[in-house]
Image (tube, coloured by chain):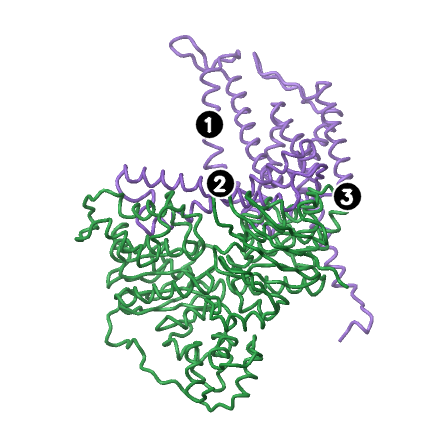
Amino acid sequence: MMMNLLEVKQFYFSYPNQSTPILKDVNFSIETGSFNVLFGKSGSGKTTLLQHLKPQLAPVGQTQGEILFLGKSVKELSLRTQSQDIGYVLQNPDNQLVTDKVWHELAFGLENLGYDTETIRLRVAEMASYFGIHNWFDKNVAELSGGQKQILNLASVMVLNPKLLILDEPTSQLDPIAAKDFLETIYKINQDIGTTIVMTEHRLQEVFPIADQVLLLEKNKPLIHGTPKEVGQILRETKGDMFLAMPIPMQIAASVEKQGTDLPLTVRTGRAWLDSLDLKEKLIEEISPVTSDSKKIVLEAKDVWFRYEQMSQDVIKDLSLKIYQGEFFGLVGGNGTGKSTALSLLGGIRQPYRGKIKVAGQSIQKYDGQALYQNLLGVLPQNPQNLFIKDTVLEDLYEVVGGMEDKDLPYYAISMTKKQMVEGISNLTHLTHLWQQHPYDLSGGEQQRLALAKILLLRPTILLLDEPTKGLDDFYKEELGQILQQLNGQGITIVMVSHDIEFVANYAHRCGLFFNGNLVSIQPTREFFAGNQFYTTTANRMARQYFPNGITLKDVVGCINHQKSF
Amino acid sequence: MNEQQKTSSKQDPFSKSHPFVNLFYFVCVIGVNMFLVHPIILGFSLIAASLYTARLHSWQSVFRQFFKFLLPSMMIVLFFNVLFNHNGETVLYRFSNGKPITLEAMVYGGLLSVVLAVTILWFRCYNQVMTSDKFIYLFGRILPASSLVISMVFRFVPKFSRQVTLVRQGQQALGRDVTDGTLKERLNHGFSIFLVMITWALENAIDTADSMKARGYGLSGRSSFSVYRLTRRDWWLLTILTSSFGYFMYTVVIGTFSMTYYPKVQLSVWPLTWTSATGMIAFFLLINLPVLLAYVEEAYFKRLRKQAKHHVRLPDYFKQ
């Protein structure tokens, strides 16, 4: 009989000074060579559990129960064995890089273990070739893209040839294309080399179909584990929150059928399932929410050109764009097409060398520095952390309005007191319970909401968001989407740059596809996605032969229910 | 690092040789330049340094640096030497307090200013050739722990300054950058940014420490790896460097290049003797080695290309 690589038996853990354990009676085992995905809401203790699998990194606190690695307690493993046999990749690609050169980073682990130069040369060469690093082997790590950095982190762990590879949300800081590449690399490692994988991940759409075992960790609940289909089935029966995170085909099937256990995981199996239903083609009819003629233009780019340096290539080429009052505009497109640059031009962070940007009918250059960002434009940067400046959430919020005392500020001629303002915004963005925390300790979704709250305190009428869903799990995404919708309902114009087409399809009124420094097409969201063959939502890809313009989960489920009843 | 990318169209074979060869060359050249104030040697150095800088960057940038920075600083050196050095017997002018301006002080000041210019040019080449990893490699052999620390510093500094830019952009969008508001507000904004950067650095250091621990940092018997190898060519270069430098130093020591400035300027190199001529040749070879190497390589490639054009007679099965 094959021995399990890892066995966790009745494991408990509590942080010091906390009465309730964060991990409670955790039991599971990991087969040698399997691909395991751990998921759950943030704050459920996923990272803590992973850290305990490699005691070098385990936090201080009280433990009970045991974790066996190849039949031996992990705590008894020597540091050398731990370093060599259990690899660990963390979330942030930047912070894990220790040295300044790619080759040095690859060699770092082997140096620590004291290998001689010849062995290191061979192992490093091997790894660089396997991961396709040889093309940028001599570079400085600072020159690499986020995706390359994370691949480098992976390679510099794999160079030690671990038996178990642990990854803690490795793709949360990456854009979708880099994330997909990364996950494919992990899968390749698992298939080619047989390394056992345990990872936490919120892109369940992509990892569910390839996982052997999935484990759901929830606060104060026993751990659920099994094959992806089994766990999906359990979640569907118990109506758990996390069902939101399941692959779209599975969600569609589950919300239509009442019984049936063979839920589809991929678009392909989803299509086969749809075919079995014997459906008729149907178009969704609805009135476009924004009619361009009747509305006022609040933000406009006119023949805008931009490049970073005089001698470099144009990043934005002859861009013209009109944003109407009160709309929700989504700017989508591939990596490096200039989306974020376009947004920073609209937000006045950078200036075009040719062409004009107009805000509320006036050239952006005519605004004095502070006037533009108060009561008018709000710009949310890609990494919300860049906005935080104080030690607690509350202080950080008050910082925007100039401190706690109620003195009049030139840009604050409103009847509310500051306290009312801060409380109001905190309620809207669900931050009240986090007031005393350090902004850096918040989870990704909470940080995003705090950044949004800070911007909102300046009462913008136009909100520019750069990748607001980056690193958020589906639960937080939905929360953020609802907040944005609420703001939009209050008359705030929203322009969002995003890779996340599912999110854009759910919330935006109009969409534009950015390509090669320009907008290729601008259309109302439904027509936009229905017209695309590849660059469209999962739901649309799955069901387009029956419902060509059904783009969201709700659309498709609605259409099926209309024709079928189970 | 950026400059290296810009000039990558121009190859410099010397930069690609072993770091030790590079270091040895610069120590010899800059050492001679600083301790031997001799017009002929300095003239050679000036030409060689300009040639090599032009090769690594461009002639345009050499001239730009010369007029913008070198010439003014040379003038200052000359000016001060003439004004405050009153040695020498050829008096050109006498101030009312009796202090003279002498020809000798002028000559010496002029030479000193050339020393300054040449040294700056050499250090510009040095910066281009001796990249951080070469430096780390060389000094890591002496102090293994320090090489990792230096490498980590080189990693941290660009990361930190990038984050400062990002935070400032974020604050700019809130109207709270260091350039916004009254002086007091600006100071306040700047201080807040400074504080949050410290928090940020400490936060991230935890991750880095975890990543180091996870890969076995702190175990005993750490080794030090490098991508460099001493090739046969490096040995050749070293041989040429040591022999030319050795012979040149020999001619210096026996007094071929001795020079007195006060009370009267006296050069010992002229008339040309056997030793002074060969000494000069050796020095010429020494300082121009990188440029010569580049020319040889270029000529070699030209010949190869020509050969490829004329003599290609591939077997039939290569044709498609």
Question: Looking at numbered disc 1 in the image, what kind of residue is underneath it?
Answer: Met
Residue B280: image x %, image y %?
70, 29
Q: Which residue is mark 2?
A: B202
Quadrant of res A271: bottom right
Label 3 CA crowd tier, 10 Å (few <14, some 14–19, many 20+): few
Query: Earlier along the polypeptide chain: callout 3 or callout 2?
Result: 2
| Distance CA(mark 3)–CA(mark 2) | 43 Å
Looking at the picture, does residue A134 appear above or below residue B209?
below
Question: Looking at numbered disc 2 in the image, what kind of residue is underneath it?
Answer: Leu
Contact flag, marks 1 and 2 (Cβ < 8 Å)? no
Nearer to us: label 3 or label 2: 2
Looking at the picture, does residue A281 appear above or below residue A268?
below
| Distance CA(mark 1)–CA(mark 2) | 47 Å
Residue B160: image x %, image y %?
48, 43
Foreground residue, A557 or A66?
Answer: A66
Q: Which residue is mark 1?
A: B75
User: Are dots 3 and 1 on a single chain?
Assistant: yes
Q: Which residue is mark 3?
A: B231
Left or right: residue B248 compared with residue A393: right
Quadrant of res B218: top right
Left or right: residue B37 compared with residue A458: right
Query: Earlier along the polypeptide chain: callout 3 or callout 1?
Result: 1
Looking at the picture, does residue B163 appear above or below residue B264?
below
Quadrant for the N terminus of chain A, please: bottom right
Foreground residue, A533 or B233?
Answer: A533
Residue B141: image x %, image y %?
70, 34
Question: Looking at numbered disc 3 in the image, what kind of residue is underneath it?
Answer: Thr
Query: Judging from the image, what secondary structure is the residue with disc 3 in?
Result: loop
| Distance CA(mark 3)–CA(mark 1) | 45 Å
Chain under callout 1? B
As drawn, the chain in green is A
